[in-house]
Amino acid sequence: MKTIVVGYDETEPAKRALERAADLAQAFGSTLIVTSVAPEMIPLGRGAGGIDPTDPPEAHVAELEHAREYLQGRGIQAEYQPAMGEPAETIVEIADSRDADLIVVGTREPGILERVLGTSVSAGVARRAHCDVLIVH
């Protein structure tokens, strides 16, 4: 297992996913790539989607800095890639571009809106991925 991509944000499931990805990277000597994806708003009408003001890219850069602090504390070197887009799709695109062997994401119990809209990032990654996916609860 040469390359592992982990989707990260400040949720507890994502923190557990980062821990698991770190364990695997250490065990296999893998390259670890940590990404945090700022979602773009869905366009309504003719306008293009914009940045979600409640979840700006700057917040995701800060999340990656927290991931860096955690991993450095464990003596793990990683690459950090902030991104914008639809989170599941973007995580898979990053994994594809890096020829990843594994994607690690966290999951949590979806709320009613997520169930109705089908917006679970972990489920979206699992549907789209071209490599193995580890979903951490």
Image (cartoon, rainbow, N blue to C red):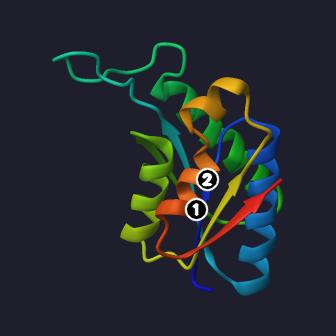
Residue 34 shows which numbered tag? none
Where in the figure is residue 81, as x and y percent of width and height? Answer: 48, 51
How far across and how far down the image is residue 69, in percent?
74, 46
Residue 119 screen position, x and y as percent: 56, 37
- Nearest the viewer among 96 and 81 is 96
Badge 2 element: helix
Q: Is residue 75 visible?
A: no
Q: Residue furthest front?
A: 116
Residue lying farthest to the left in this orientation: 46
Q: Which residue is mark 2?
A: 123
Residue 113 is at least partly visible in this image:
yes
> In the figure, 23 relative to 11: above or below?
below
Residue bearing the label numbered 1: 126
Quadrant containing the N terminus in the rendered view = bottom right
Q: Do the numbered discs 1 and 2 sit on residues whose CB atoms are within 8 Å?
A: yes
- Classify mark 2: residues with Cα within 10 Å, few (<14), some (14-19) or many (20+): some
x then y, percent, for residue 7: 61, 52
Q: For the point 46% across and 60% down, which residue is it?
A: 92
Q: Is residue 90 above or below residue 130?
A: above
Measure the alpha-carbon separation of dots 1 and 2: 5 Å
Type of amino acid at the residue the image marks with label 2: Ala
Q: Nearer the viewer, residue 65 or 84?
A: 84
> Which residue occupies 71% across, 75% down?
25
